[in-house]
Image (cartoon, rainbow, N blue to C red):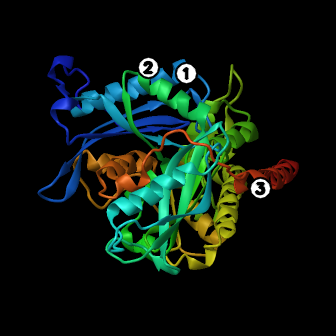
Amino acid sequence: MIATKNQSTDRADIIDASSRPDIIVGLDIGTTKICVIVAAPDREHDTVNILGVGVAESSGLNRGVVVNIEKTVRSIELAVERAEMSSGVKIHDVYVGIAGDHIQSFQTRNIIAISNPSGEITQSDVQRLIEDSHNIAIPSDRRILHIIPQDFIIDGQDGITDPIGMSGVRMEANVHVVTGLVTAIQNIHRCIERAGLKVRELVLEPIASSHAVLDKAEKEIGVALVDIGGGTTDVAIFEDGVIRHTAMFGIAGNKVTDDVKKGLGIIQTQAESVKLTYGHAHQQSIMQDEVFMIPGINGRKPMEVSKSLLCQIIQPRMEEIFEFAFAEIKRSGYARNLSGGIVITGGCSQLRGAEELAEQVFGMPVKIGIPSGVIEGGLAPEVQAPMYATAVGLVLYALNSNANVHQEIPYQDVQTPISPSQKTNENGYKTFISRVKNFFDEL
């Protein structure tokens, strides 16, 4: 956890963010942690200064969904207070990341006629086409979060990425629609409002993370982002500079911790500490197989555990997470188009050997995604870690000139197919359970 710069700072010394309209605040509400980042653009050097960071343990969410309002509010308040003390800025409104296995996405196509007498396509025509996409029918219990144009077709000519200025009488667009459960979205809004904040925009977390860890070249040649958080794993695929596919499933870092807890017979906090301190996701990454001690519970004798034994518990679950992600990538149809390979990020990607195991599962180049690029100044070094990818990405998303493309949309009615990840969960769990059984049988 990042310590504040001056815990004893007088609250009266904190300036109001309303006096600094350039200040942007990103709020990552995760299953294991709440992270707040306060930042401001440095126009002179075309960079972003990180003014403050606040992190608090999250105890009111499960798989990215709020399950306890009061606990979530307290966690948000604590993280915000730490960010305010760190930055010296009073926070009012935030860009919020949203995830969870309730998120679903699908592709659709819309068409409009060009009303301009000259036939020239304008920005208003593009906006009208996007707004027309809101009229697709979805169930009443779902809300559209993002409508992302992927490419345009003008009078039958496809593959157009920027139609403004072109001539035509009919324009179509293939769009990527992201929806979430109304109740889950309302609960997030309610928690933030009870914490005394205003939601500027809800942003899908893999979209936010992509702004922090992917560059334009990677998005152009084709890359898949796999963000492994505490409660969910998020997948986003980019090609030709456009997001092509998104998916989420509820198997992530907390499942790894649960396996360590059950496999070693220890409590949750011990399991998390052991995972972070001694955990390896790939046997070959263990250079020296050390033995460490775990204190006994209630007077019991301490337990000796080796790194290799711990890895036998962790590796099957991590492999399962990567297999689920790879299944989503193959289902998208873009598996052969990923010249940029795979980028893994999120807190669980920091496990030793995760990169090597991912390369083995995906069969293509893999790198760890760390926020970098335009992030400079202030507390920038402190947030250059995978666990801060979403929070940093929310700030960059807000500052990005194309942010208005991924706008938050009012309630609509649309038919949304069942997420492919839901169809694979049952078989995946069976595979994992059989591996765990084999492991314990061999002990």
Q: Residue at x 41, y 21 (%)?
A: 195
| Residues at circles 1 and 3 in contact by the CB criterion of under 8 Å | no
CA distance for labels 2 and 3: 37 Å
- What residue would you read off at disc 3? 424
Numbered circle sitting on residue 416: none
- Residue 69's label in the rendered image is 1
* Residue at which label 2 appears: 194
Residue occupying the far left of the picture? 44
Which tag, 2 or 3, sits closer to the chain's start? 2
Relative height, residue 47 to residue 96 (above, below): below
Q: Nearer the viewer, residue 311 or 124?
A: 124
3 left or right of 139?
left
Amino acid at pointer 3: Thr
* Mark 2 Cα shell of 10 Å, populated few (<14), some (14-19), many (≥20): some
> Circles 1 and 2: CB distance less than 8 Å?
yes
User: What percent of the width, then of the height, locates residue 289?
Assistant: 62, 56
Any part of residue 353 in sight: no
* Quarter the N terminus occupies: top left
Distance (Cα) linking label 1 and label 2? 9 Å
Numbered-mark total: 3
